[in-house]
Amino acid sequence: MHTFAGVQLPNEGEEVGLVAENPSVPTADPPNAGPRHQARSTSRLSRLLPPPGPTRLIAVLSLVNSTGNGAFYALSALYFTRIVGLPVLEVALGLSIAGIAGLVAGIPVGHLADRRGPREILVLTLVLAGIADGLLLLVTSYWQFVVMACVFSFATAGASAVRNALIAALATGAERSVSRAYVRAVTNVGTGLGTALAALALHADDRPSYIVVMLIDVVSYVLCAFLAVGLPKVSAPPREEAAGILTAVRDLPYLTVTGLSAVLALHYEMLAIGVPLWVVNHTSAPKWLVSVLLVLNTVVVVTCQVAVARRIVTLRHAITASAVSGLLLFESCVVFGLSSSGGLVIASLVLVAALLLQVVGEITQAASSFVLGFDLAPEHAQGQYQGLFGSAMTLSALVGPTVIAVLPLRIGPPGWWVLGALMLVAGLLLGPAARWAERSRARADLVVPRSGETPSATVWSPPT
């Protein structure tokens, strides 16, 4: 056993764990702290991470990487337009093309993880993302930017799919969704830290400062690849049991669940794009309230996501939670629409109420999606299925800004109601869709093998 960056890395076959000191988490003790203070700090740190074991290392990896990502994404648009000198429209088009590359990455990379082992493919995608990330800082032309952005997007989307497949392989039952909730919570922490670091470069506003801060993201990928080597090796299924590369997209029930989940996930773009522009352009609330609302959202996610996930651990729970989240998000949209009337104080109070409805709906939807994504996928094809689920979320992020711009931002309060109704209907329909997928999976698991084959409950073929 050896230690690096506060994480105990195992020899082959050993369990992993996090030691008390982790400089990447903003709860470090002062040098003169006493034992009691250190114990309290360790307790706070433990609440941010899963119990000791492989999934804790995945959470630490996610914390490190999201810190780098937070710095990079906060600065990238300004870097490529102001420092490199690319036109704004070209950067926007290049990022859209890169988004498509990320959209198609999940399924093939996830399938490769199913065939070759998720740990090895995770290391490969992290290294590839780090290389592309570093080369992005060296681009001098538009086509260099597009090519590197596409490689970077493809690698990061693939790494996300493989990470979730690793969680499915290293955890069982309710532990999967809870581990995924820990990852989401620490990702919010890391993104916030990275965004704060980006403020240093924005203050200096020169090329060296931008590059130094954005290099944090490159370093994070290298460090994460190193950490990922310490994860346990997961054996791939026998070749005769391996799923085909199009198995997931041919699984219509699961595809329906992912599509409805993507509609319900429009709340992410609603928060990132709709709420700031609505507050500034359509209400009497002060502009600084945007920051308050976003910080409030982050605090609730970080402190409550795991607790909510612990209560949503079965498919039945997830079905109920999907409907509840749809209702909460609908109510949030209605209240956001009401905030356009009233003075500064009234509008501010209404916006805070709407945000609280939104964030409770968000963490409920996220927890239910973890269960749906894991439990409805065949065990030997988790990589491919997690890739499909992730691609649906990417599609939602690509389409979401247009939906938000057309509905609430252009139409006003009625547009908010339509947006809320879309999410409400998606949440209600996820119940029948999930039960359909559950029945389909049960039938597939009972497929009678061909003559001469050994019966196996893990053999799966797509429903006809």
Image: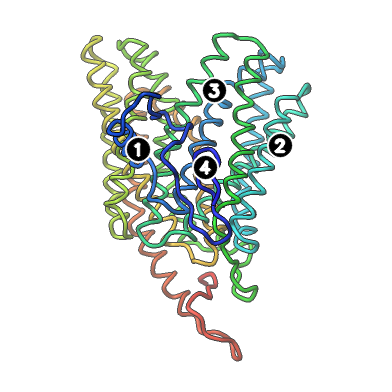
Q: Kindly report the distance in space between the C-alpha atoms of the residues bearing marks 2 and 3.
A: 20 Å
The image quarter in which residue 232 lies: bottom right
Q: Position of residue 291 (x, y in %)?
A: 38, 18
Discs 2, 1 touching: Cβ within 8 Å: no
Q: Kindly report the distance in space between the C-alpha atoms of the residues bearing marks 2 and 1.
A: 34 Å
- Mark 2 = which residue? 131
Tell me: 49 left or right of 222: left
Q: Nearer the viewer, residue 446 or 294?
A: 294
How many numbered marks appear?
4
Q: Kindly report the distance in space between the C-alpha atoms of the residues bearing marks 4 and 3.
A: 20 Å
| Residue depth check, mark 4 versus mark 3: number of the one nearer the observer | 4
Going 31% across and 29% down the picture, which residue do you hit?
34
Q: Nearer the viewer, residue 99 or 363?
A: 363
- Mark 4 = which residue? 61
| Residue depth check, mark 2 versus mark 4: number of the one nearer the observer | 4
The image quarter in which residue 409 lies: top left
Q: Position of residue 368 (x, y in %)?
A: 35, 50
- Mark 1 = which residue? 42
Disc 4, SS: helix
Looking at the image, is mark 1 or mark 3 earlier in the sequence?
Answer: 1
Tell me: 177 left or right of 147: left
- Mark 3 = which residue? 74
Looking at the image, is mark 2 or mark 1 earlier in the sequence?
Answer: 1
| Residue depth check, mark 2 versus mark 1: number of the one nearer the observer | 1
Q: Amino acid at mark 3?
A: Ala
Disc 4: CA contacts within 10 A as few (<14), some (14-19) or many (>=20): many
Going 45% across and 37% down the picture, which residue do you hit?
187
Q: Position of residue 459 (x, y in %)?
A: 53, 76
Q: Position of residue 111 (x, y in %)?
A: 62, 59
**Is residue 403 shown above or below 76?**
below
The image quarter in which residue 13 lies: bottom right
Disc 3: CA contacts within 10 A as few (<14), some (14-19) or many (>=20): some
